Image (cartoon, rainbow, N blue to C red):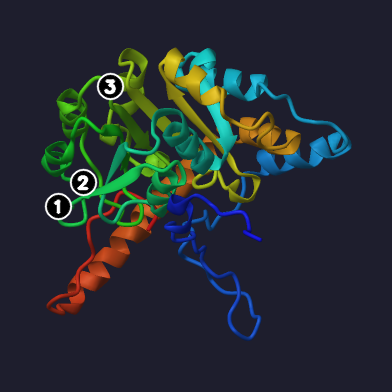
């Protein structure tokens, strides 16, 4: 008797391996691979989460109305053009699921986020890896790989795991060079660590262009990694397509309330950003001062 057989492209997926939280002896480890906020969670977000304990028997609002309205007010974007998910990982998967399948291609840069490869293979699409430029996104290399089968391009900015940054003009040039039927997905999980002058224009592009999706998360600077709250912003048609394939419920009530509260924790966010910039620079200078040939710190705009 034959057993159920998974799709061949599923078995080609290399499972995501998260960083270890303990040592071989069971001791707690200082885990750096997940890039969590060392300052924890804003007090207001922690309080909002705790106050939601009396709602544990209830399903969350499937439309995430309150969070979308809060994001709309905070970033000046339309609430109806926001999608949400269990971390921005889910939003990335939704984009691939809505716009790619067997026979299609999804481009991402070498040293890009591991989920891009999984998201592509999960739907039977072919991942196409563009060469990097000194660990950074090479716009020309991406454009050279675009074919009639290309459906999505994933770009993390700042990049994960290298921390490199693609300037606004280069993001605009990448978008301008893509066919209109290719969805450009700008993964901005670490955008809050950028200085204001380093805005890559992603939200502006997504506001005006029908083939741009921006994804963000509350897992990094907002300190809510355990609650898996992510979101995306794009054209209404893109958002509508993704909504059709997402699960009815994502994060819980407490997570949603904590995320809303975290948006207002501007002092916490600024302290996290400035502290990170100070010590990231210190660490880079220490490596440089060692003078070891072959060892250098790649310029980073992220929290690693």
1 or 3: tag closer to the N-terminus? 1
Viewer-proximal residue, 270 or 94?
94
Q: Residue furthest bottom?
A: 25
The quarter of the image holding the C terminus is bottom left
**Proximity of marks 1 and 2: CB atoms separated by less than 8 Å:** yes
* Residue 133: mark in rendering: 1
Left/right of residue 167 with respect to residue 19 in the rendered view: left
Disc 1 is placed on an element classified as loop
Q: How far apart are marks 1 and 3 (CA)?
A: 26 Å
Q: How far apart are marks 1 and 2 (CA)?
A: 6 Å
Q: Which of marks 3 and 2 is in front?
A: 3
Residue displayed at 16% across by 41% down: 145
Disc 2 is placed on an element classified as loop
Circle 2 packing at 10 Å, graded few (<14), some (14-19), many (20+), is many
User: Residue under circle 2?
Assistant: 137
Residue displayed at 35% across by 56% down: 161
Circle 1 packing at 10 Å, graded few (<14), some (14-19), many (20+), is few
Disc 3 is placed on an element classified as loop
The answer to whether residue 218 is seen in the rendering is no
Viewer-proximal residue, 84 or 169?
84
Does residue 11 lie above or below 144 as drawn? Answer: below
Q: Quadrant of residue 99?
A: top left
């Amino acid at each position: 008797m034959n057993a159920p057989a998974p799709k061949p492209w599923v078995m080609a997926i290399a499972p995501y391996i998260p960083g270890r939280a303990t040592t071989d002896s069971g001791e707690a480890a200082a885990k750096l691979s997940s890039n969590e906020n060392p300052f924890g969670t804003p007090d207001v977000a922690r309080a909002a989460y705790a106050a939601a304990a009396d709602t544990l028997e209830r399903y969350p609002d499937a439309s995430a109305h309150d969070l979308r309205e809060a994001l709309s007010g905070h970033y000046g974007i339309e609430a109806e053009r926001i999608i949400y998910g269990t971390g921005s990982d889910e939003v990335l998967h939704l984009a691939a699921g809505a716009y790619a399948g067997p026979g299609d291609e999804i481009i991402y840069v070498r040293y890009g986020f591991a989920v891009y490869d999984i998201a592509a293979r999960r739907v039977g699409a072919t991942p196409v890896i563009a060469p990097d430029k000194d660990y950074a996104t090479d716009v020309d290399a991406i454009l050279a790989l675009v074919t009639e089968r290309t459906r999505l391009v994933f770009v993390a900015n700042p990049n994960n795991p290298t921390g490199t940054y693609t300037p606004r003009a280069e993001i605009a040039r990448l978008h301008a060079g893509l066919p209109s039927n290719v969805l450009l997905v700008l993964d901005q999980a670490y955008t809050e660590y950028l200085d204001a002058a380093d805005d890559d224009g992603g939200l502006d592009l997504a506001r005006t262009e029908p083939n741009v999706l921006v994804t963000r998360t509350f897992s990094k600077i907002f300190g809510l990694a355990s609650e898996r709250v992510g979101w995306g912003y794009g054209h209404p048609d893109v958002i509508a397509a993704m909504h059709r394939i997402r699960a009815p419920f994502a994060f819980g009530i407490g997570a949603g309330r904590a995320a809303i509260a975290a948006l207002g924790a501007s002092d916490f966010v600024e302290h996290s950003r400035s502290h990170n910039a100070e010590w990231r620079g210190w660490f880079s200078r220490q490596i440089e001062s060692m003078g070891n040939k072959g060892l250098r710190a790649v310029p980073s705009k992220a929290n690693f």
